[in-house]
Every structure is written in C-alpha cells, then in structure tokens.
Image (cartoon, rainbow, N blue to C red):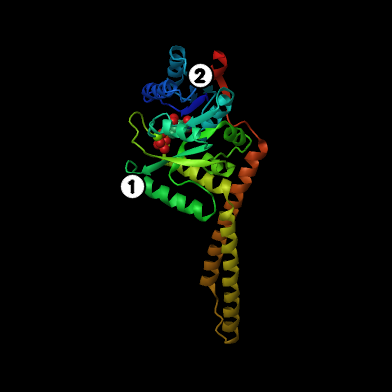
Amino acid sequence: MKKLVIVVPAYNEEESLPKSLDVLSDVLKDMVKEKKIDEDSKLVIVNDGSKDKTWSIIEEAAKKNTHISGINFSRNFGHQNAVIGGLTAARPYGDVFITIDADLQDDVNAIPKMVDEYLNGYDVVYGVRSARATDTRFKRWTAEGFYALMNKIGVEMIPDAADFRLTSGRVVDELLKYKERNLFLRGLIPKIGFPSTKVYYARKERELGESKYPLRKMLALAWNGITSFSVAPMHFVLGLGVLTILISFGMMVYSAVQYFLGHAIAGWSSIMVSIWFLGGIQLIGLSIMGEYLGKVFNEAKGRPRFIIQDNLLKDKK
Ligand code: UDP
Ligand code: MG
C-alpha cells in the first residue's frame, strides 16, 4: 500500500495547530482503516521559525501520536520555502504527498478524494476552490485580476488552486530538481506535467489565529509569480520605449515645421514635459531591469532555501 505524507507549513500557529493536528490525524487514521493508504503514513509539520509555541506543540504531539512528525527551521523562510522544505525532508518517507495550510481553511474532506484520484492514476491533484464566498471582496477582486494577468502574459496556472494539492513521489522528485530560490509553486507544478486532475471544495474562513499573509506578503508573492515566470514586463517597457521614440519623431517634424513657419518660440513647456516623461519611462525601465538583475543575483548566489534545525523524521526511524 502507498504511504501518504501530509506536509503542513506552520508559522506562529499555536492557536490553530492543536485542533488541526487532531483533525488531520483523524483523516489519516480513517484512510488507514479503509486500507486506502499504508499505516506508516504521516503528518509532517514544518515549523517555519515561529516565535510562539508552535514547535513545542509539534514535539509534544509527535511523542503521543506515531503518525505525527515535524521539522524545525532555524528561522522564518516563508511559506513557499516551508512547503518545499517539508517535501524535501519527507520524500524518503512517502510515496505520495499532500500539502495543506495549518489553519485548515481548505476542506480536509477533499483529502480522501485526492487520494482516490491518485489511486485512479493521477500524479497531480489540484485542490480548487469552488466558491470564494468567504473571501473579502478585495481579496476576490485582486485574485481574479491576478489570474487574468498571469494568463495574459503566458504563465500557465490553475485558477483558484492555491497550495492545497496532491503530488506523487515522481512529481516531487522532478519538483526538487527546480533549484530556483524565488519559488512560486503554483506556477511550477503545471510545468512539470504528468496526468493531473482537480478536486473542488469550498474554502472556509480561518477559525483560529489570524492570517500570516498580510497584503504586503500577498503582493510580494504575486510580483514574484510574474517576474519569475515571464519577461512580459520587460517587453512592455520595450514597447513603451518604441512608442516614445515614434512620438518624438512626430515632435521633430512638428518643431521643424514650426521653425520654417517662423513660429519658433522658446519651447520651455514642451521641453519640461518631455524631460519628465522620458525620465519617468527610463526609471520604470531601469527598475524593471533591476528586478530581473536582482533575481539573477539571488539565483547566482545559490543560497539554501531553508535550513533544518531539528528533524523528528530522522529521530523516529
Ligand atoms: N506560513 C508559513 N510561513 C510564513 C507565512 C505563513 O509557513 O512565513 C504558513 C501558515 O502557517 C499557513 C500557511 O502558510 O499554514 C498559509 O498562511 P495563512 O493561512 O496565514 O494565509 P492566508 O490563508 O491568509 O492566505
Ligand atoms: Mg489561511
């Protein structure tokens, strides 16, 4: 039978984790009872440098419940790195993997359905939200805009699929070959290929604790998604530059005509306007170039994406 590992990133989740651990381990036990998965299946909680009691909760739970294990990062590395860190550490212990957030906003009833699809032969099962009723209008609106934009600039993404998904061992093996530091898993997984399908569920509101994703982190993730997968912003600036040059040709002709008609007056205003306009365009262009340069810089350094301080998986074996 196949061993399932559920990977859960957790950052300052002391409020929601105790309940989430109970719920998830019940889901796991039920599937073991139904002989869907091996009894050696696990929950691996990744403590992403929490400042609260998250890690001691994980350690305690691991002592009491043989299904629960965890890894402890040396500091906060961010959600995406916590997921990849969990998958890296857990890979030797499982055949199939599910990632889910610690607050259980995603419906755990979708987990057995995902496993069913895996047993039907699918390597990737995306958890897709059927409704966004629980999101604020702002979040819904920005999310829709984001997916439309990503689609337009040619980044293949499954709309309304976040990081709740099942991946088979061979997909995880391929995923771990992508060595990039600017991780955007939602964009990477579709690039790996293999047979995939979707499971729909209704996303709930966070019950305990508060969101660890403030607007700042959300925008950073979206920006990372765009610039890590597409050079469209650079093309856009190129287009803007070409357009500006065309306009300046027109201006040249216009001013020559004015000159020969004897209308040439000191063109202070037009010069001021063009200086500001061109200055602005150049700054935008430079900053976008800088963005890519910064990414090259980050990738070239090849620093680790996460550092594991404690690994309960190893202790147990
Ligand atoms: N998370 C993490 N590291 C971080 C921020 C968040 O591991 O730096 C985890 C968090 O504990 C949760 C998941 O990522 O399990 C998603 O975060 P959250 O639920 O706060 O985001 P939201 O659902 O509000 O978008
Ligand atoms: Mg959440």
Quarter holding residue 176: top right
- Residue 92 seen in render: yes
Distance between mark 1 and mark 2 Cα atoms: 42 Å
The residue identified by callout 1 is 137
Q: Residue at x 45, y 33 (%)?
A: 116
For the residue pair 260 and 236, the one nearer the viewer reads as 236
In the picture provided, is 31 more to the left or to the right than 73?
left
- The answer to whether residue 47 of the structure is visible from this angle is no
Q: Is residue 163 positioned above or below 157 on the image?
A: above
SS assignment at label 2: loop
- Dot 1: few (<14), some (14–19), or many (≥20) neighbours within 10 Å? few
Task: Characterize the local packing of mark 2: few (<14), some (14-19) or many (20 or more) Cα atoms within 10 angstroms.
Answer: some
Q: Amino acid at mark 2?
A: Asp
**Which residue is found at the position 66% from the left and 36% from the top?**
301
Marks counted in the figure total: 2
In-front residue for pair 208/148: 148
Q: Position of residue 235 (x, y in %)?
A: 59, 58
Identify residue for label 2: 40
Quadrant field for ligand 1: top left
Q: Residue at x 53, y 27 (%)?
A: 86
The picture places residue 75, in percent across and down from the top left corner, at 53, 26
Q: Is residue 277 above or below residue 52?
A: below
Callout 2: CB less than 8 Å from ligand 1: no
| Residue 192 spot, x, y in % from top left | 59, 41
